[in-house]
Image: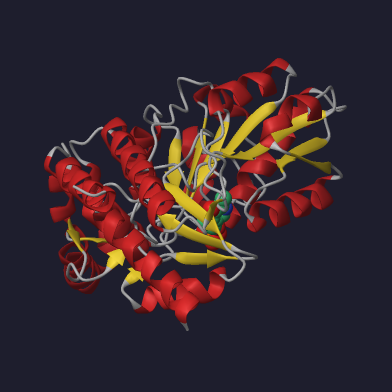
Amino acid sequence: MGADQQLTARAADLDAADPIAAMRERFDLGGDEVVYLDGNSLGAMPRSVPAAMADVVEHQWREGKIRSWRESGWWDAPERVGDRIGRLIGAGPGQCVVGDSTSVTIFRSLCSALRIATDADPGRTEIVLDSTTFPTDGYVAASVARCSGATVLRASPAEMGNALGARTAVVLCNNVDYRTGRWWDLPAITTQVHSCGAYAMWDLSHSAGAIPIGVDEHDVDFAVGCTYKFLCGGPGSPAYSYVRHNLLERIDQPLPGWCSHADPFGMSDEYQPAPGISRMRSGTPEILSLLALNAALDVFDGVAIGEIRRKNLALTEYFCDCVGQWTPALEPALAPGLPRGSQVSLRHPDAAHIMTRLVSRGVIGDFRPPDILRFGFAAPYLRFADAARAAQELAAVLDDARVG
Ligand SMILES: *Cc1c(COP(=O)(O)O)cnc(C)c1O
């Protein structure tokens, strides 16, 4: 057997031995012709969603109307769905709540963390920000700083230790770099942050649903993340925030609303924060998208995130082997041997054009400026054969470019 056939045969063997292969049936992928590698941007649709949405709209809303806040459990949905996400990130109950966009949630959590730190020690006025962060986190951090008189210091997670000191209030770090796919060591960085007396806040947007995180186990103070990537909650599904249980009673959040009040229906002029994680709510929850997310999360029932992690490591390793053999002109954005999340990023000066051609051949990845081709590997619905096909199409696109 030639090297090419060996690689293809390996995909078949890996698929045959895949313990979570059946998870793919829980998704409506709209056919097998398209290889969808953009689940790190918008996860595919779980089959459980349409019927659940029809029930929400036709029964709970159309028939139940206002009664559904109580009878269909709409009012508590942010906490209930929060606990389901908590299970996936290693949080015990009562520490996660869902609502608002990730950007808004980052603002709320970062400002809350800063207030706790500065109240306890007025000298702690610095936010240390992951310098490789997704833009929104940086924009929000700058605004939190302007609102509060704090400053922002940017530091690479690789050198976080050097940036920390007596002025550090809170560190906002991404668990996985959205560009390169680098997976940062959450337990080690959290320990560094704590040893300088600051609070650790993690953005889990690219790891929740793909990697076991263990927020409780590793003493994470605050965490946020979006739910439409590997968690498959649907376009614009609301974000979650996690707050470690022993900080909950100290939370003084910057966007208090009637839904985070201790007695929401008392309609008092005086604000009294709700006990527990409900104090991280603000206004009326986005019930339609929240309940779509709730239905989507069924895909994770009975599956350990560790199984998903084993598979996405194997999938990305296999894809890297294929790329190494078939498209050596593409340079991995992450040096071999560095820890990787659930995506592979490749560099090429003509990346935007290559991705357009690849998409037209039925392999959906995405382009991130200036030169990155991004491929997300959502283990619940991808097969090793899909990784092989993606690498073959990529090779064909590069060949065409050379000829044409
Ligand atoms: C996807 C992503 C976001 C998205 O923010 P939204 O407000 O949901 O648009 C934020 N932060 C990171 C790190 C992300 O990867």
The residue at 35%/57% (across/down) is 290
Residue 266 visible: no
Spot the residue most to the top. 195
The residue at 32%/44% (across/down) is 315
Indicate the position of residue 286 as horizontal and vertical percent values: 41, 62
The residue at 41%/45% (across/down) is 342
Residue 344 visible: yes
Spot the residue most to the front. 2
Indicate the position of residue 144 as horizontal and vertical percent values: 75, 49
Q: Foreground: 248 or 321? A: 321
Indicate the position of residue 142 as horizontal and vertical percent values: 78, 52
- Of the four image quadrants, the one with ligand 1 is bottom right
- Where residue 79 sits, quadrant-wise, is top left
In the rendered image, the vertical position of residue 212 relative to residue 281, given as above or below: above
Q: Number of callouts in the render? A: 0
Residue 318 falls left or right of residue 374:
left
In the rendered image, the vertical position of residue 329 relative to residue 63, given as above or below: above
Residue 89 falls left or right of residue 243:
left
